[in-house]
Image (cartoon, helix red, strand yellow):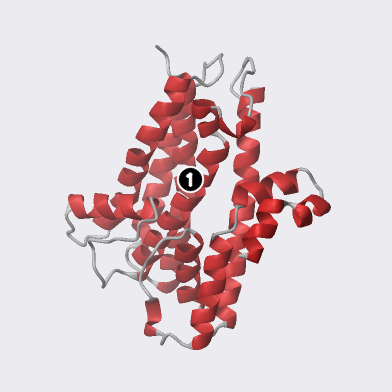
Amino acid sequence: MRFDLFWVLMGRTAYVFAPLYLIPFAYGFAFGDPAAGSFLALAVLSAILGMVFGNMGRSHMRQLSVQEGMLFLLVVWFLLAVLGMLPFHLAGLHLSPIDTFFDSISSLTTTGMTALGGGLPPSLILWRALMSWFGGLLFIVILVTVLPVVGGCFGVDFAVQQERLFSPLWNRMTRPMREMTVLYIAITLVAVCIYLMAGDEIFPALILALFTVSSGAGPMTAGLPPTPGLIFGGGLVSLLSALPLLTIWQMLHRRSGTEIVRHMELRAFFAL
């Protein structure tokens, strides 16, 4: 059995990690963190890996099968965990692979537990927060793309004949990916602004926003005291992280502000 579209999905996932690596690289380069160079090398490696996987699935001529969807849901977490643990080892911290793999899985699944303790360089703290943030985004993306294929949920019909790589089915999968990502980023930026208004510094505000929006957990950087403003800001961002993004996305997709106001699920959420 061929798994062409499975490799396409794995390649796209690897591609996403390439620009994600560039964020801690840019921060480390700007502030002289010696671990910055490893992130640039991993960005190139991730892009090459995405090209290889995409090339393996370039000839797919059919719709996504249930087997491919289930295999992707299982394997993608191990691929991301390996990509996530590499920066810790390239930074020369002499950490156990078991600890870094555990930490990567914990961050990507927004569990929040860590085996690495404190004392990490700022770029690696940022990387842990980004993995947690990306894990929350990946769950949302899978919710609106791959899971409907595997479970038939949300009433999404994927019975479309494919003729080339950028087929109608693939376009229907990438559109919700793009739109949900934009919505997720917008909420993250709002969260950063809330923490800044609460008196936080820019770097801790970014770290806290990445962790809170993904419903994860991470270190409270810069040693700021838990002031009432910061606690209130954290509660407000936690409320944002609990927003039913799938429902909001569906309502925005219909371009009807009236439906958003009158939608029973959203009204119940804000009432609670």
Query: On screen, 243 above or below 82?
Result: below
Q: How crowded is the residue under tag 1: few (<14 C-alpha within 10 Å), some, or many (20+)?
A: some
119 horizontally vs 39: left or right: left
Q: Is residue 236 left or right of residue 134?
A: right
Please indicate, yes or no, whether residue 200 appears anywhere in the rendered image.
no
**Residue 172: where, in percent of width, then height?**
65, 31
Please state, as top left, top right, bottom left or bottom right, where the C terminus lies in the image. Answer: bottom right
Disc 1 marks a residue whose amino acid type is Phe
Find residue 178 and report its image quarter: top right
Q: Could you tell me residue 58's position as x and y percent?
A: 51, 21
What residue lies at 61% left-to-right and 34% top-to-bottom? 154
Position of residue 202 relative to residue 55, above or below, is below
Question: At which x and y percent is residue 221?
Answer: 38, 77
Query: Which residue is depicted at the point 61% across and 28% down?
Result: 170
- Which residue is at the front of the view, 55 or 160? 160
Determine which quarter of the picture holds residue 63: top right
Q: Relative to residue 60, is residue 244 depicted above or below?
A: below
Frontmost residue, 222 versus 139: 139
Mark 1 lies on a secondary structure that is: helix
Q: Is residue 133 visible?
A: yes
Report the residue marked by disc 1. 139
* Residue sitting at x 43%, y 53%: 21
